[in-house]
């Protein structure tokens, strides 16, 4: 309850910030985009990671309001970078199932893009299989509307959610993110390797891009490159960074 009260104040006092984790193209090694990750600068506690508070935001419904802020803040940052030497860079935001059911996700996004003069394909939404299953009719409408604008759509934590593969046809998806659980032992565990290869193959057959998350070693990276995974994300390439540090990386990558 103390946490819930503190989170309500955090919204009012604007104590949230976004860090950005780079994603890399496996063929060129260049930065492909960034994932925006929520952090809470809680007074007296330092920087708090989302695994300590996301569940409270979800359960109380506060994630709808915070999720709106995340979209607005990501759009503001994309616009700032766009009109700076950094230039155009795609940013992915994580979207919770409750943002489809409640709130005005498509309105928030279309307003954010317009306000900051951003091409829609610089925004990518990371959705979990479970969040897609929760609300199919309304979710389908919202995603098709956003897709028509040019917003990109990725499936996060692919392979671990409660889902049927039928949603790969129903929803206008651009990219699959292979869950870290399959990447961790991909070079040593034949079952994990089989799953990863099947996901890469299926993604490419469906003309989707595929990214591996949680890449921590050169061995994992080399394995994924050899098997034609498109992109990687993980501590091996970069940790999530504050906006100013990520901007330096982007400038050096040019
Ligand atoms: O950054 P970190 O690895 O601690 O994130 C932990 C979890 O919190 C991840 O599952 C991530 O998807 C989730 N998360 C991070 N930022 C956001 C956000 O802005 N919105 C939602 N809904 N989830 C987020
Ligand atoms: O569920 P989602 O994919 O949105 O979660 C992203 C989270 O994964 C971020 O909080 C980020 O800190 C974490 N993460 C990113 N790269 C790595 C990695 O290489 N190893 C581990 N263990 N976690 C990672
Ligand atoms: Mn994610
Ligand atoms: Na993930």
Image (cartoon, rainbow, N blue to C red):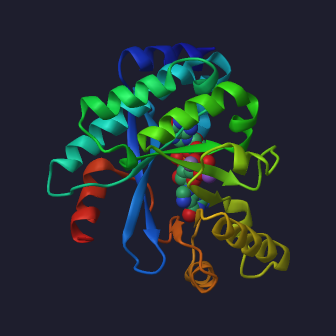
Q: Quadrant of residue 39?
A: top left
Left or right of 141 on screen, residue 197:
right
Q: Quadrant of residue 185?
A: bottom right
Q: Residue furthest toward the front?
A: 148
Q: Residue at x 64, y 30 (%)?
A: 139
How far across and down, in percent of the image, does residue 252 sit? 23, 70
Q: Residue at x 50, y 26 (%)?
A: 105
* 111 to 245, vertically: above or below: above
Report the front residue among 73 and 101.
101
How far across and down, in percent of the image, does residue 219 sit? 61, 84
Q: Residue furthest toward the right?
A: 191
* 70 to 175, vertically: above or below: above
Report the front residue among 143 and 104.
143
* 227 to 117, vertically: above or below: below
Report the front residue among 30 and 115.
115
How far across and down, in percent of the image, does residue 204 sit? 64, 70
Report the front residue among 141 and 47.
141
Q: Is residue 48 visible?
A: no
Q: Residue at x 56, y 30 (%)?
A: 142
Q: Is residue 137 visible?
A: yes
Q: Quadrant of the N terminus?
A: top right
Q: How many marks?
A: 0
* 199 to 27, vertically: above or below: above
How far across and down, in percent of the image, does residue 236 sit? 50, 71
Q: Quadrant of the C terminus?
A: bottom left
């Amino acid at each position: 309850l103390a946490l819930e009260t503190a989170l309500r104040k955090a919204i009012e006092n604007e104590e949230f910030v976004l860090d950005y984790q780079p994603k890399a193209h496996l063929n060129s090694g260049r930065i492909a985009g960034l994932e925006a990750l929520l952090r809470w600068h809680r007074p007296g506690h330092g920087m708090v990671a989302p695994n300590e508070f996301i569940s409270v935001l979800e359960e109380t419904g506060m994630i709808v309001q915070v999720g709106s802020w995340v979209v607005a803040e990501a759009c503001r940052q994309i616009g700032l970078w766009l009109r700076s030497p950094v230039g155009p860079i795609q940013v992915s935001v994580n979207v919770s199932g409750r943002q489809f059911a409640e709130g005005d996700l498509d309105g928030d996004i279309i307003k954010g893009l317009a306000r900051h003069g951003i091409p829609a394909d610089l925004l990518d939404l990371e959705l979990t299989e479970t969040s897609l299953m929760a609300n199919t009719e309304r979710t389908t409408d919202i995603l098709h509307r956003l897709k028509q604008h040019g917003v990109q759509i990725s499936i996060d934590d692919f392979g671990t959610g409660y889902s049927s593969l039928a949603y790969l046809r129903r929803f206008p998806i651009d990219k699959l993110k292979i869950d870290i659980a399959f990447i961790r032992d991909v070079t040593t565990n034949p079952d994990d390797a089989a799953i990863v290869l099947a996901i890469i193959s299926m993604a490419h057959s469906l003309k989707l891009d595929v990214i591996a998350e949680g890449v921590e070693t050169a061995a994992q990276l080399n394995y994924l490159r050899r098997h034609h995974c498109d992109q990687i994300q993980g501590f091996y390439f970069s940790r999530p960074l504050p906006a100013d540090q990520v901007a330096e990386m982007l400038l050096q990558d040019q």
